[in-house]
Image: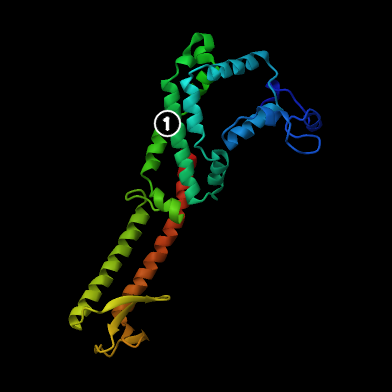
Amino acid sequence: PLPFSSALILDGQTLINLEIANTVDGGTKGTLFQLVNRCITPFGKRLFRQWVCHPLSKAQQISERLDAVDVLLSPGCELREHFLSGMAKLPDLERLVSQIHAGSCKAHDFVRVLEGFEQIEYTTSLMRASNGDILDPGNGGNDGIIGRLLASMPNLSEPLNYWKGAFNRDQAREEGLFIPSRGVDDNFDSGYGTISRVEADLQALLARQQRELRNRNIKFADISKEIYQLEVPGTVKVPKDWRQISATASVKRYYFKELDSLIRGLQEAEETHSQTIRSITSSFYERFDKD
């Protein structure tokens, strides 16, 4: 909020009587805010509404703001074009960042936040490169509002570089899951390796059974929750210790001790891995807060 020392204090009734943000009947049509609002981002609109409802009281600050407007409205101002084109692509960063702090942000929205800050970093670099208007002494030089804002902008390159390769953004957008890149999370890498090894063991078991039973048509079948059933043509004779789980007119499906053990190991590894993925969401949001 604006400090009272630099802004006029207008109570709610005064704001209504003057129809600053709302009319007497509660609407917004014809209000001062509707007339002057040209904001292109939701968070910019909220900030501008605050400015309108708490107008500056000091002549120097008013003059500085008018000077900044003059710079941006001057013919051929590259700064304005860079700013408008960049800001128009931004999501509602203010609200999305608050969701990240609360741990309630969806994965696809987190990607939007990162892309938004990448756009801000890119736009800021373009604005700094075309700062002739800002540094013109007649426009306030580095002491002007725009110059001060650019100078105060933090360098986002380093934290953004980490996020560029931290996880698969396509999966986050489409599936709502954070799948970290190799080397980002040791627990994830370990869990993924365990699952891959068990799956390889299952394929090796399948190949061995095809050889021993001399039938290349033997394969795995997932029926409901009963995964990796060994599907064998009905004419093939199987060991006596195999348990039939399901069947059709042409095939029978079995479990046996070695297969049971591998399936149980796979399910345990997948459950542990799922818990790791859920914990990664929290760790990513904590890392974002620190950055």
Question: Quick one: SS at disc 1?
Answer: helix
Q: Give the side of residue 18 with respect to residue 290, left or right.
A: right
Q: Which residue is drawn at 52% across and 23% down?
A: 149
283 lies above or below 196: above
**Which class describes the residues within 10 Å of circle 1: few (<14), some (14-19), or many (20+)?**
some
Quadrant holding the N terminus: top right
Q: Where is residue 131 in the image (x, y as percent from the top left)?
A: 45, 18
Q: Can residue 9 be seen in this view?
A: yes
Q: Residue at x 42, y 26 (%)?
A: 125
193 lies above or below 156: below
Question: Which of 193/11 is in front?
Answer: 11
Q: Residue at x 63, y 34 (%)?
A: 46
Question: Which of 186/203 is in front?
Answer: 203
Q: Where is residue 253 in the image (x, y as percent from the top left)?
A: 33, 83
Q: Toward which corner of the image does residue 27 lie, by quadrant?
A: top right
Question: Which of 36/290 is in front?
Answer: 36
Q: Give the side of residue 88 with respect to residue 209, left or right.
A: right
The colour scheme used here is rainbow
Q: Position of residue 150 (x, y in %)?
A: 49, 23
Q: Give the side of residue 79 with respect to residue 1, left or right.
A: left
Q: Toward which corner of the image does residue 13 lie, by quadrant?
A: top right
What number of labels is visible? 1
The three-letter code of the residue at mark 1 reads Tyr
Q: Toward which corner of the image does residue 246 lie, by quadrant?
A: bottom left
Residue occupying the far top of the picture: 138
Q: Where is residue 191 in the image (x, y as percent from the top left)?
A: 35, 60
Residue picked out by circle 1: 122
48 lies above or below 132: below
